[in-house]
């Protein structure tokens, strides 16, 4: 075994680069690409993501000569390679010869080739063909000096959130056999005596295809678990092949932030480094905070390990109805946000703008208009900034606030036939936005990962609450923490069934309340007769609740806010030195901010930097404090530390619009 194979290569410094698709260009362009990459400060590129057809033009033949040449060129130019397994888009010969690999929708209609991701992740034939390809690539390049990282697949599930094919049918039955100790256990978990759905054999079970009316919610929940597991199995199968071939480099795949179909919390342990694709919409008024939420989610998936921004846009994308470009300075500001929230790699889709295909209007580091463009100047300047950064500290336990976010709960809470329709992600992000405006570091974790490192935990709409999660939250409060539980929480078990005893059966004793009715309100913008809002008043004033005004009863808790009717709207119960609060309505944006400000006063959690306006973002990773001005005017910030780019001590910084600063501020010091 060679020395290169025997060691695991560490990713040194902050990576800077992009997806590179040399197969789309004549070979005489490649040397120019490498020269321009060096000019832009590129240190790493992702190669081969959609190159299956070029690497394996027929089932019997492989062509590595072109890939050999480009990897050698990149290595000679001092540029590392994130080498892909090329399995994201099977070539036409695969689906032509093996149509059983094609996925189907819930109506049974096939998805055909001509786009990408046209394969059933549970298809044995697809996995066989993909495995053969990966094995040949791994055996050839495991020791190549250019390869610093392996990229498995691409954006698993992006365009195919669920597959209902016959391959999925067979794999789902096998998955259920592993999950349940016999068909009777499945019947009990799914409640199949309802509507005469009882099964006598696993072979009677089908994926939840098109049905006349509502489908079994427990079956839907398991099918979502199964779907996420099928994508994960594809990743793990390719990972095993890479390791068996002697690849010692880190292995990852690109996630997509809060992506509903895949439970990334289950994926994270299998990724050597978390990698993320993030495309904030310039037209979204919450874009800055939604992007920050996504960065914090990625950081929270693998605590203490820097993550990679695998894809972002240099300017406009091509797949929205209106593809607005980024204003000058925005690219650098978004990059600073990533680094401040734990990223050690900043990469783009893509290096050279495509000349054909669906993404030819998608921006790139090197646009069609060439090096005389603002985009090119921006990426060169950004490369210089990244190259000037010193070694960055790993993300630490900097957050004293945790926001509970759970994929299984997401799936369950958004199933139909509930008292009201809830947008779980939006409601979680509403709480995050309020915390972000107050410049607090926030971890985004499942209930089971809450610990005594936090002072404040907010658990929005935790409808599906597992026993372990409930026990962890109770332990957190008993240990001195402050917990806020919001309405429509602790309603069902892991099979989407009511527990005996009504609602809040696990958290009710901790909270000191009983819940008897959900008190549904007419949704904002909705029609119909009924209450549309539920104003409530606490010691700090009045706020507005929406969607629900639950009927709760204080058994062993203090009522700290009331609805206009005088009914309890919020309660608090002291447990040792901790507090357990319950909110019986869903506050609007201002109401959420009102409550967060009260929780800050109650718990004493401190911002990263004091006295900042809401449009300035502050983040901490160890001793590194990052400030970004997302506003439209210059601002002077009083903060002491060392400017790591200027190598100078400062007592204040001046930030122009979209300006940023990286400061060394030891955690033992208090910001003025």
Image (tube, rainbow, N blue to C red):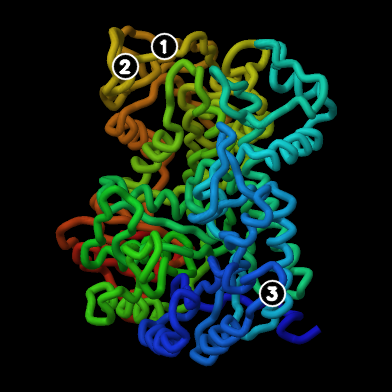
Which is more N-terminal, label 3 or label 1?
3
Foreground residue among 88 and 258 = 88
Distance from disc 3 to disc 2, alpha carbons, whole Å, reads 68 Å
Q: Is residue 473 above or below residue 361?
A: above
* Front disc: 3 or 2: 3
Front residue of 320/191: it is 320
The residue positioned 50% from the left and 22% from the top of the image is 416
Q: Which mark is residue 519?
A: 1
Q: Residue furthest left?
A: 633
From the image, tell me which residue sits under label 2: 534
SS for dot 3: loop
Real-space Cα distance between discs 1 and 3?
65 Å
Q: Which residue is mark 3?
A: 61
**Dot label at residue 406:** none
Seen from the viewer's position, the closer of residues 335 and 351 is: 351
Question: In the image, what residue occupies the spot 65% across and 11% down?
Answer: 195
What is the crowding at mark 2: few (fewer than 14 residues within 10 Å), some, or many (at least 20)? many
From the image, which quarter does the C terminus lie in?
Answer: bottom left
Q: Residue at x 54, y 43 (%)?
A: 161
Question: Which of disc 1 and disc 2 is earlier in sequence?
Answer: 1
Instruction: Label 2, secondary structure: give it.
Output: strand
Crowding near the residue tagged with mark 1, few <14, some 14–19, many ≥20 C-alpha atoms within 10 Å:
some
Where in the figure is residue 477, as x and y percent of width and height?
57, 33
Q: Is residue 545 above or below residue 372?
A: above
Q: Quick check: can you spot residue 14?
A: no
**Image coordinates for residue 357, horizontal then vertical, percent:** 40, 63
Q: Secondary structure at mark 1?
A: loop
């Amino acid at each position: 075994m060679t020395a290169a194979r025997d060691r695991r290569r560490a990713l040194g410094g902050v990576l800077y680069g992009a997806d590179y698709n040399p197969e789309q260009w004549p070979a005489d362009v490649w040397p120019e690409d490498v020269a321009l990459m060096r000019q832009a400060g590129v240190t790493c590129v992702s190669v081969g993501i959609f190159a299956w057809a070029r690497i394996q033009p027929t089932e019997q033949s492989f062509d590595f000569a072109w890939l050999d040449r480009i990897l050698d060129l990149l290595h000679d130019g001092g540029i590392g390679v994130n080498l892909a397994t090329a399995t994201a888009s099977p070539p036409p010969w695969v689906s032509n010869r093996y149509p059983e690999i094609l996925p189907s929708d819930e109506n049974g209609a096939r998805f055909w080739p001509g786009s990408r991701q046209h394969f059933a992740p549970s298809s044995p034939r697809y996995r066989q063909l993909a495995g053969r390809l990966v094995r040949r690539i791994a055996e050839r390049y495991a020791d190549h000096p250019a390869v610093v990282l392996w990229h498995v697949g691409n954006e698993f599930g992006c365009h195919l959130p669920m597959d209902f094919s016959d391959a999925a049918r067979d794999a789902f039955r096998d998955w259920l056999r592993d999950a349940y100790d016999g068909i009777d256990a499945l019947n009990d978990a799914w409640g199949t005596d309802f509507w005469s759905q009882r099964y006598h054999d696993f072979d009677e079970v089908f994926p939840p295809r098109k049905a006349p009316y509502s489908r079994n919610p427990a079956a839907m929940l398991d099918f979502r678990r199964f779907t996420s597991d099928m994508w994960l199995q594809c990743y793990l199968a390719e990972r095993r092949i890479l390791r068996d071939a002697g690849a010692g480099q880190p292995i990852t795949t690109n996630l997509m932030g809060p992506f509903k179909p895949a439970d990334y919390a289950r994926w994270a342990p299998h990724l050597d480094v978390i990698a993320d694709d993030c495309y904030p919409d310039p037209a979204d008024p919450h874009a800055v905070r939604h992007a920050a939420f996504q960065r914090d989610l990625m950081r929270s998936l693998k605590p203490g390990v820097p993550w990679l921004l695998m894809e972002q846009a240099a300017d406009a994308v091509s797949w929205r109805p209106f593809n607005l470009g980024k204003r000058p300075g925005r690219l650098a500001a978004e990059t600073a946000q990533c680094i401040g929230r734990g990223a050690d790699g900043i990469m783009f889709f893509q290096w050279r703008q495509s000349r054909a295909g669906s993404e030819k209007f998608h921006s790139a580091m090197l646009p069609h208009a060439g090096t005389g463009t603002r985009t090119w100047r921006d990426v060169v300047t950004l490369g210089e900034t990244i190259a000037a950064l010193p070694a960055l500290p790993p993300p630490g336990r900097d957050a004293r606030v945790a926001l509970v976010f759970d994929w299984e709960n997401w799936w369950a809470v958004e199933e139909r036939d509930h008292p009201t329709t809830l947008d779980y992600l939006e409601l979680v992000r509403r709480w995050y936005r309020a915390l972000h405006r107050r410049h607090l570091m926030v971890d985004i974790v499942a209930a089971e990962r809450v610990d005594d490192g936090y002072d404040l935990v907010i658990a929005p709409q935790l409808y599906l609450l597992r026993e372990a999660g409930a026990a962890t939250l109770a332990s957190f409060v008993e240990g001195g923490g402050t917990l806020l539980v919001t309405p429509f929480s602790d309603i069902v078990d892991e099979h989407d069934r009511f527990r005996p005893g009504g609602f809040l059966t696990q958290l009710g004793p901790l909270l000191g309340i009983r819940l008897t009715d959900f008190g549904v309100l007419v949704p904002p913008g909705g029609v119909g007769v009924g209450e549309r809002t539920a104003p409530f008043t606490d010691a700090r004033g009045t706020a507005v609740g929406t969607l629900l005004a639950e009927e709760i009863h204080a058994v062993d808790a203090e009522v700290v806010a009331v609805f206009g009717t005088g009914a309890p709207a919020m309660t608090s119960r002291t447990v040792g030195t901790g507090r357990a609060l319950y909110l019986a309505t869903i506050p609007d944006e201002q109401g959420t901010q009102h409550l967060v400000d009260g929780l800050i006063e109650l718990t004493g959690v401190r911002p990263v930097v004091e006295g900042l306006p809401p449009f300035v973002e502050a983040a901490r990773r160890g001793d590194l404090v990052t400030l970004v001005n997302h506003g439209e005017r210059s601002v002077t910030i009083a903060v002491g530390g060392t400017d790591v780019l200027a190598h100078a001590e400062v007592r204040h910084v001046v930030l122009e619009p979209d300006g940023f600063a990286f400061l060394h501020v030891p955690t033992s010091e208090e910001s003025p």
